[in-house]
Image: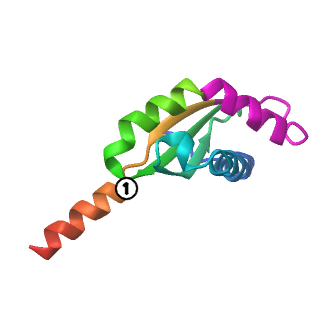
């Protein structure tokens, strides 16, 4: 069982989530093939070296393509994030993107309830 996140981890996570969301928003939907990309959560490792960014992608048919684009542009995104947070953080964490499937799950439950 993993330890609960410290206050510092939570603060850094929230800051990275806000900045990463802004970077992705600034690129626009066209950069992601017309898909809407939302950073729903960022969890940071205890040593602040790894940030797990959970993204939800709408429409869900474009999830694989957008995840591939995010991985492809990981270094550039991390570089932009570094320029944004360099005053607050000594080390810019490595970003690992994960698909946030909570929206799909909620949609699935809704469909089941309609039946």
Which quarter shows the C terminus?
bottom left
| Res 67 visible | yes
Residue 81 is covered by the magenta coloring: yes
**How far across and how far down the image is residue 61, in percent?**
31, 45
Q: In the figure, is residue 17 to the left or right of 115? A: right
Q: Which residues are magenta?
A: 74-94
Q: Quadrant of the N terminus?
A: top left
How was the colour assigned to the protein in this rendering? rainbow
- Residue drawn at x 69%, y 53% as measured from the top left: 18
Q: Is residue 75 magenta?
A: yes
Quadrant in which residue 67 is drawn: top left
Q: Is residue 33 left or right of residue 81?
A: left
**Residue beneath the point at 45% across and 38% down:** 66
Q: Is residue 49 visible?
A: no
Answer above or below: position of 81 versus 29.
Answer: above
Residue 89 spot, x, y in % from top left: 83, 37
Q: Kindly identify which residue carries mark 1.
A: 102
């Amino acid at each position: 069982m993993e330890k609960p996140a410290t206050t510092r981890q939570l603060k850094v996570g929230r800051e990275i989530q806000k900045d990463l969301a802004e970077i992705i928003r600034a690129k626009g939907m066209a950069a992601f093939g017309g898909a809407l990309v939302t950073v729903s959560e960022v969890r940071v490792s205890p040593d602040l070296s790894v940030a797990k960014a959970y993204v939800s992608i709408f429409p869900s048919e474009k999830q694989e393509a957008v995840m591939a684009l995010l991985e492809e542009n990981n270094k550039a995104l991390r570089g932009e994030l570094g320029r944004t947070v360099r005053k607050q953080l000594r080390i810019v964490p490595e970003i690992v993107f994960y698909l946030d499937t909570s929206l799909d799950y909620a949609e699935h439950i809704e469909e089941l309830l309609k039946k």
